[in-house]
Amino acid sequence: MKTIYNEYIREIEANREENAAAAQKIRAYLNDHGIVYHGNIVRTLGIPNIYTEEEIALFRKITETTYGIFEKIIAAYLNDPAYRRLFPFSQELEELILTPRGYDSMLPVCRMDIFYDDETKDFKFCEINTDGTSAMNEDRVMNEALALLNPAHKKMMEKYTFSTFELMDSWVNTFLEIYSTYDRRVPHPHIAICDYLDGVEIEEFYEFARRFEKAGLTCEVCEITELTYKDHALYAPSGKQIHAIYRRIVTTDVMENYSDLKPFLDAVRSRDVCIIGAFCTQIVHNKWLFKMLHEAPTRALLSAEECAFIDAHIPFTGILDHNTCDMDALRSGKDRWIIKPMDSYASHGVYAGKDCTDAEWASHLSEYDGKEYIFQEFCAPYRSTNIDFIEKNPAFTSYANMAGLYVYNGKFAGIYSRRSGGNIISSQYNEMDNATVVLH
C-alpha cells in the first residue's frame, strides 16, 4: 500500500498543473450534485482512501462483533428494568425507546467511526452514529468525480483494479427487508424520509427517494413538523398516508423539540406508522454507551471474547462531573483526554486537550463540568500524506484519518473516509472527505 500511495504522489508531482486544474473541476462537480455541508462545498483530497480486500474482511469482523455486542445491550435495556436504570434517559425518551418496533431489527443502520491505523491494523472507536447516519450519497458522488476527473487516479486505474461501495440501493433493499418483517405491513407502503429540512443539505434525501421509487414504491421527503395525524393514520404534507418512515431526524433534535412533533410522536407511540429506526437505537447512539461498555453490568451480558474486544478498542470514558471524577487529574494530564457532549452530532462542542493551552483546557473543563459531558481517553489518529489543491499554496501534508464503517442491519456495507489537518476530525475542524476504493 505504501508503494501505491507513493505512486500517486509521484504521478501528481509529475503532472501538478493538470491535477490542480482537475481539483477545481471536481469541486464544481460536487457543487453541481449538491455535495455541500452548511452551504460549503465538501472538500476532498488528491489521493483517495485505498483499502485491501484483507482490510475489508477485518472491517466485516469488527462490525459483526460490535453489532452483536450492541444487540445484547439493547435487549437488556428493553427487558431488564434494573439495567435500564443505569442509563440517563428522561421518562419521555424511555417511553419512546420502549415502544414496540414491530419488526425484527434492533439497529437497522449505523456508522461506526473508528481510528484505524493503516500500518499496524489496530483501531479504536470514536463514536457510533445511528439513525442520522449520512454521507452515503456523498461517497457515491465523490467516487464518480474521482473516476471521471482525477487524472492521477485515472492513470492508476490503468495499472490496478479498484472497486467502490454501493450504499444507496443496498440501504433501500435493507429497509424493505426489515419492513417485510413488520407486523402491520401493507403490500405497497408509502415511504417518508423525515427530518427538519430547514438548513439541512437534503440532496441525499431526494436521492434516496429516487432509489425507493426505482424499487417500485412511492416515497417523499417530509418536513417532520408538517406531518398530521388523524384517525390512526399519519399523513405527509402531500396528503398521502405514510406507512413507513426512514427516520433521519436524530433523537437529540426530537427531544429538544418534543412539543412541536406531536403528530409524529403520537403516531409512533400508537404504532400507527412503522419507524425505521425505532428509538431503541438511542441506547447505542448516546456516548453514555462507551462508559457502560466498561462497567460490570454490561460485561456480565457479554462473552470473554467480547469483553476483550472492548478492552482493546473502546477508549476509557467517564462522566465530566467534579462529584464523580478527578478534575485535578484531568487538568494536569490534558494531553491524555478529550471531552465531548453525551448526545450530539457533527462533533459540536468537542475539545481535545492536545489542541488547548493549559488555560483553555481548564476553562473548558470548568464550563462543561456537570453539563452532560464525557471525558474520554484521547486516541491519536493515524496520519497519512495527501494534498488539497483548493488550498492557496497546496502541498503534501500529514492528515489525521477516520474510517466510518456503515452497517446495514448487522452487515458491513461500506466506508466513509474523512481527513483533518488537526487532531479532531469534524466539519468544524477543517474536515475533508475522501472517496474510498478497494484494491483487488
Image: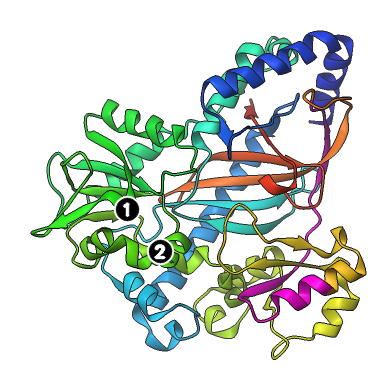
Q: Is residue 298 above or below residue 174?
A: below
Give the numbered dot on residue 309: none
Residue sticking out furthest to the bottom: 323
Across the whole image, how many numbered discs are drawn on residues? Answer: 2
Give the numbered dot on residue 225: 1
The structure residue drawn at horizontal position 88% and vertical position 17%, both measured from the top left corner, is 10
Q: Which residues are magenta?
A: 363-388
The structure residue drawn at horizontal position 78% and vertical position 31%, both measured from the top left corner, is 1
Question: x, y percentage for residue 60?
Answer: 55, 47
Circle 1/circle 2 CB separation < 8 Å: yes
Q: What kind of element bears circle 1?
A: helix
Residue sticking out furthest to the left: 231
Residue type at mark 1? Thr
Give the numbered dot on residue 257: 2
Q: Is residue 90 above or below residue 68?
A: below
Please check the rendered image and state whether residue 368 is part of the magenta-colored stretch, yes or no: yes
Residue type at mark 2? Asn
Q: Which quarter of the image is occupied by the C terminus?
A: top right
Of the numbered discs 1 and 2, the one sitting upstream in the chain is: 1
Question: x, y percentage for residue 160?
Answer: 69, 17
Q: Nearer the viewer, residue 151 or 205?
A: 205
Label 1 Cα neighbours within 10 Å, binned few <14 / some 14-19 / many ≥20: some
Q: Is residue 145 visible?
A: yes
